[in-house]
Image (spheres, coloured by chain):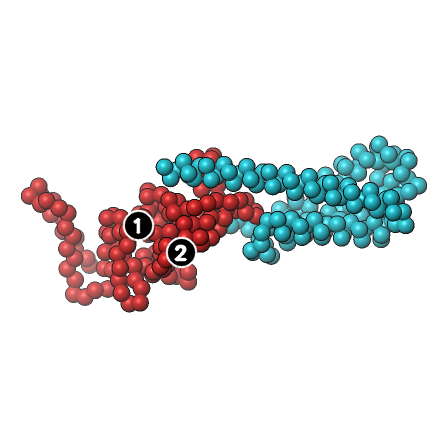
Amino acid sequence: MDEKKTIFDYIKQLFTTYGIMVVIFIVTNLLVGNEARVLSTLFSLGSVGLSTATLLQLLFLAVIITVAQNIFLSDLVIKNMALIVRNILFFVTVMVASTLFIILFGWFPVGDPRAWIGFIVCFAICTAVSAFIMRLEENAENKKMQEALNKFKK
Amino acid sequence: MMKINLDIDGKYDDTEVIIRAPHLNNDIERMVAMMRMIDMQIAVRKDNETYLIETDKILYIEAVDRKTFVYTNSENYESELKLYEIEQELIERDFLRISKNSIVNLRKIKSLKTDVNRKIRITLQNGEQIVVSRMYSDELRRKLGLR
């Protein structure tokens, strides 16, 4: 019998994602906030800090990521699906959501192809690296379990 | 009330169990099935016939709608016993509970793979796949010496 997740588990998951996103944006803001304030609404206050609007937009994005995690990376909704397909669907959902946020909230100039290329390259690198790390972890765990099983059966 | 007589004497070569009853009922069938398990056998039914199968032929046992099903490489049978009764007897024989409604013979596992939510997907020797629920996956890891 699996222990059921409570609402507090989902809130914890949401705010973990949100916390990581806010830390990344604070660090980015400290590094390039003043230069980026004219180009991006995310850094409208310059290096001073992140605006309430930015924090709320990030919270909304964190909600979408948490929902996508629970749909694609758990068996809450989908019972049988290969892990690789789950990961692809998860990252596609996050990319579509991020693109919508960029257009809706003007996170960077939507008419600037270099900005889009930068976004796509960054997203692709982050996705590839996280998928690669997940795959490595999964393979190592599977190998460890298989070796333990073989030893047990001897 | 059921009477129990024990006759322990060095003159006997083997252990013999005799059940005397006015008619065969479910309690007696379950009693016999449990005694069979001590002998590494399990009494199961299929198409109104009773079979005795060796416990080491079992891949896994599953409870569905208050019925207990026993799966071997190519056949599936029904048992009179409840899952927990079988579990009590087989736990010492490399069987392990893997979810609320199933126990698996660890020696019949071909491979193990991690699944979502810290679950483990088991592929059995006949290619069939079953999932170890999150609650029992840590116990499986412990049993394999990984914790």
Q: Can you name the residue that lies furthest to the left here?
A: B11
x and y percentages locating residue A81 in the rendered image? 58, 54
Q: Nearer the viewer, residue A15 or B96?
A: B96
What residue is at 54 percent from the left and 47 percent from the top?
A: B115
Residue B132 vertical position relative to residue A36 in the rendered view, above or below:
below
Residue A30 vertical position relative to residue A12 in the rendered view, above or below:
above
* Residue at the spot of label 2: B62
Q: Can you name the residue that lies furthest to the bottom here?
A: B48
x and y percentages locating residue A58 in the rendered image? 78, 45
Element under label 1?
A: helix
Rendered image quadrant of residue A134 = top right
Q: Is residue A40 left or right of residue B45?
A: right
Instruction: Please identify the quadrant where the N terminus of chain B is shown.
Output: bottom left
What residue is at 59 percent from the left and 49 percent from the top?
A: A83
Mark 1 vs mark 2: give the one in front: 1
Q: Is residue B121 left or right of residue B103?
A: right
Can residue B135 be seen in this snapshot? no
Give chain B's shade: red
Q: Residues within 10 Å of mark 2 (few under 14, many from 20)?
A: many
Mark 1 in CB contact with mark 2 (< 8 angstroms)? no
* Residue at the spot of label 1: B55
x and y percentages locating residue A99 in the rendered image? 80, 51
